[in-house]
Image (cartoon, grey):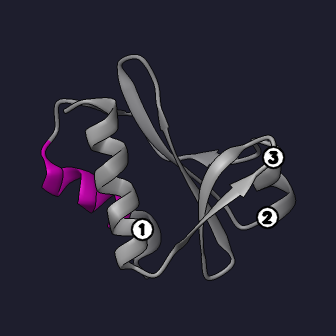
Amino acid sequence: MTKDEIRTICEKRFAELGAEKIELQPSGKCWTLDGEFFKVTTLRSWWVLEWTDNRSQASNFGFEDVDLMPYNISEAEVLEQVNSLIVK
C-alpha cells in the first residue's frame, strides 16, 4: 500500500469510532477520542501509529510509538493495528 492509502484507512477508522480530527501546533493533524490523542506517521519504509493521553505532549510531538509497521500489509491488518490501539 502507499502512504496515502495507509493514512486514509487509519483516519477513516478513527472517524468511524467517533474520533475528531484536530490541528495541534506544532504537531499538525491529530485525532482525539476519549481524552487520548492519535497520529499516523508515514516514514520512508514504515508507518507508525502514535498516541498520548496528554494534550501538552500531543501538542509538542510527545507521542508514544506503537511498533513500526511495513506498507506491504493488508487493509485488515491495518485496521487490526488501529483497533488494538483505540478499541477498548
Magenta stretch: dominant SS? Answer: helix
In the rendered image, residue 75 lying in the magenta stretch gets the answer: yes
Can you tell which mark lies on residue 14? 1
* Residue 71 versus residue 23 in the image, above or below: above
Disc 2 vs disc 3: which is toward the camera?
3
Q: Which residue is mark 3?
A: 25
Q: Residue at x 40, y 77 (%)?
A: 87
- Upstream in the sequence, badge 3 or badge 1? 1
Mark 2 secondary-structure assignment: loop
Q: Which residue is mark 2?
A: 54
Q: Residue at x 73, y 43 (%)?
A: 27
Q: Residue 81: horizontal and vertical position, in percent?
A: 32, 56
Q: Residues within 10 Å of mark 2 (few under 14, many from 20)?
A: few
- Horizontal arrangement in the rendering, residue 41 relative to residue 22 (left or right): left
- The magenta segment: 74-83
Q: Residue at x 25, y 61 (%)?
A: 80
